[in-house]
Amino acid sequence: MYDIIVIGGGPAGLTAALYARRANKSVLVIEKATFGGQITYSPKVENIPGFISLTGNEFAEKLVEQVLEQGAEVEAAEVEKVEVEGDIKKVTTDCGDVFEGKSLIIATGARHRLLGLPNEESYIGEGISFCAVCDGAFYEDKTVAVIGGGNSALQEALLLSDLAKKVYVVQNLDFLTGEEKLSEQLSERDNIEVILGTVVKELHGEGELTGITVTEEKTGKDTLLEVDGMFIAIGLVPQNEIFTEVITLDDRGYAEAGEDCITSALGIFAAGDCRKKRIRQVTTAAADGAVAALAACDYVDNMK
């Protein structure tokens, strides 16, 4: 029996584990993919206090090391079911293990949003990617498209421009939504072409992606872009599906929890990108983790 079970090993979940261990609570962190979460895909991070610059992987490694040093237990598995039996939270993983905890922190983050095009998933790994730092080397001296106009998309485009011959940035709005500094850096790259007010209509290629048809929304004009790869960076979808019968979710699937990270279920808290909130940054995820952990500690203390 653990005092606190944390589902999700990103900045929110790991920070929660850190704070809970500092409060001398027994903690288990369960992560189905990569400890560190989405930030591990970032080749360069400059907005974490105390660090001028570091990679997402470096940050994740430091955080995991810190949590293990504090004595938290970790489990690499996917949670398939969460049940509440009185005051006890039972968590079942795909390995068949069942863990029990007095409290639960949901820090599952979010996954990449897809465009919703026919056969889109069949091209994942065959021309469609989400991580330039992971797959950018495959497109050296080739042509790629980055779909999206936010910070993530612009960062992907900048990284790819160092490798690829040509980079298209396709944004459905008439303006880029990323930081002005990133937009300025894009404009300074000769091999980056920004296409605004345009959506991806169709994917082409037998087995591997060879091109995309884009449509200008105002005129309906179609253009075929011959590309060797496409990086999708249009946002995230909260990974809260298994909690639909446990806590209240909003119409987009985010956990209904305020800045106190308290959900509709007693003893269950939500932290990070899976929670309904306006700002989703690594610092706000870590802040959520601290708040959720302290709330969970108070809950456990009051059970005694």
Image (cartoon, rainbow, N blue to C red):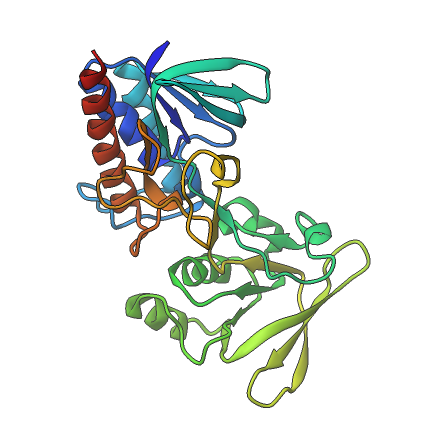
Q: Which residue is farthest front?
A: 86
Q: Residue at x 38, y 61 (%)?
A: 151
Number of on-image labels: 0
**Residue 45 horizontal/vertical position (percent):** 32, 48
Would residue 59 be visible to someone looking at this image?
Answer: no
- Which image quadrant is residue 211 in? bottom right
Q: Residue at x 27, y 50 (%)?
A: 46
| Residue 223 in the figure: left or right of residue 300 | right
**Residue 85 horizontal/vertical position (percent):** 43, 18
Please state which of residues 175 and 61 is positioned toward the viewer in this rendering.
175
Q: Is residue 169 above or below residue 17?
A: below
| Residue 181 in the figure: left or right of residue 99 | left
| Residue 51 in the figure: left or right of residue 128 | left
Please state which of residues 181 and 35 is positioned toward the viewer in this rendering.
35
Q: Residue at x 42, y 41 (%)?
A: 109
Please state which of residues 186 and 122 is positioned toward the viewer in this rendering.
122
**Residue 277 horizontal/vertical position (percent):** 31, 52
Q: Residue at x 18, y 23 (%)?
A: 298
**Residue 89 horizontal/vertical position (percent):** 41, 20
- Which image quadrant is residue 268 in? top left
Image quarter (top left, top right, bottom left or bottom right) of the C terminus:
top left
